[in-house]
Structure formats: C-alpha cells, structure tokens
Amino acid sequence: MRLKNKVIIVTGSTTGIGKAIAIRCVAEGAKVVIHGLEEAWGKEVMAELGNGNAVLHIENLNAEGTPERLVQTALKAFGKLDAVVNNAAIVASSNIHTTDKAYLENILAVNTIAPFLLIKAALPYLTETHGCVLNIGSVNAYSGEPNLLAYSVSKGGLMTLTRNLGDTLHRENGVRVNQINPGWVLTETERERKKQHGLSEDWYKDLPSVYAPSGRIFAPAEIAAAAIYWLADEGGPVSGQVVDLEQYPFIGRNPPKDTSTIPKTK
C-alpha cells in the first residue's frame, strides 16, 4: 500500500475527480477527510469508504475559517495530517462581457485563495510529518477556452502558487507542493454541464479526434491513479512541478485542419 497510515484532506471529494482520489487514497491505505457542499453525496462516499477510513466535513470553502476547521477535523479524527489535495473548484462559463467584479472575486476565492489558505492552515502539521500538497489544476491554466475566462484565470493563479510554494516550502519546511493539470474529464458534473450547453444526452460517446485521439476522454479514476504518485513517499524530493495530464501535446499543438467536426456549445 503506497499511502499506508497517511492522513489526507481531499477538498471537493463528494463527487468527480476528488471523490475518485479519495477512494483511491483509501485503497492505498490512507485515512481521508471527505469535503464538499453536498451532504447526501458525502454520505454516499462515506458509506463506500467506511467510517473507520474517512470523516465527512460539509462546508463552503469560501466561508471564514473553513480551512482551519478542515485541518482540525483531520487532527481530531486521525491525530495528524500528511497531505492536502486542493481539488474543489467552481467550473463556470464566462467571458469578458459576462464577468463582473463580484463574479471574478467569487471564482478566485474558491479556486485560488481557498487552496492558499488551506495550505497555510495545514503547514505546521505538514511540517511535522514532512508531508505534501497536491493541487488539482487544469490545462486551461495556460490560456483557457473563450467561455472559461474566470475559471482559466483562477487556475493560472493556482499554477503560480504551486511553483512558488513548491520551492519555498520545500526548502524551509520540508513540505513538497506539486500540481497536476487534467485535460477533459468525464465527471458527473461535466456530463450535465455539456447537456446544458446544448449537446446530446450521450455527447461523450462520439467525440472528434481533435479532442479525443483515443476515442474518449479521461475517467476520474485515471486522474486519481496519477495523483497517488505525488502523495506517496516514492515522489521523493520532487517539488514545485506542474504536470499536464492530457492525451495530446497541449502547448504548441497543430490546430485541426477541419473545424467542422468541432462540437458547438451555446
């Protein structure tokens, strides 16, 4: 077991990538703090993992004091803290015309500032265990889709945070900080989001090769499998790194010659 006896907070773990990471962590021997906004979904995850392996904390990351309460939840339940996975995020469509100050501030608060605050709250305890942080970003951090402006900006900020703290905290506290940037993942919320954009019920079954050379997009469990390396001791001294998880070269990729097959969204 690669994470035996480790205690890990996974934000946004009542569904999607976070849920998959939490399940894989427990399978690898860890104890986890399940976090999210959906209590019913959280209880389903708890039932799957078992009370001895996990504890549930339902609270908005944007609420004052949530990071400190998450850390205390881990300490009270399991006595220590070995890792933090900053996965929770608001994925919402917007462009320069639809993004006002309040909207941008809310996206940044949850997607960028909350991870920073949770790292800060957890740092004394991660220092004791020579622990680590894994931030879950997005390939949209590099520039983003036209209709994902605020989200893309928030993930760009998270990437810089990872590289900055991955250097300073590793040298000063012995705490590694790394990030994975997933590409397109077929989560429960992504299925619904694309349907709301006007795509068919089974839109993910017939995707253009420009988006899915393999014929499909990622499953959450595949992102979780990659996350384990960064949380395990086998990651060694690696810190301050951002790794893209995509099925094609993201930066510098040749654009498609025929754009007629690209699915249109509203």
Image (spheres, grey):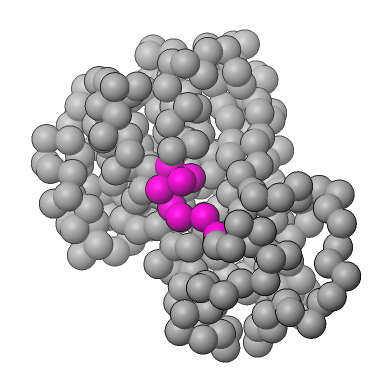
Residue at image coords 51%, 86%: 200
Residue range highlighted in magenta: 217-224
In this rendering, would 104 be left or right of 125?
right
- Locate residue 253, reporting x and y percent: 83, 53
Q: 202 above or below 145? A: below
Residue at image coords 50%, 83%: 195
Q: Is residue 180 visible?
A: yes
In this rendering, would 243 be left or right of 57?
right
Q: 68 above or below 170? A: below
Q: Main secondary structure of the magenta part?
A: helix
Is residue 53 magenta-colored?
Answer: no
- Locate residue 35, reporting x and y percent: 32, 49
Residue at image coords 57%, 70%: 92
Residue 24: name its quadrant: top left
Residue at image coords 74%, 60%: 144
Q: 66 above or below 258? A: above
Q: Is residue 6 visible?
A: no
- Locate residue 135, reporting x and y percent: 54, 39
- Locate residue 193, reporting x and y percent: 51, 76
The C terminus lies in which quarter of the figure?
bottom right
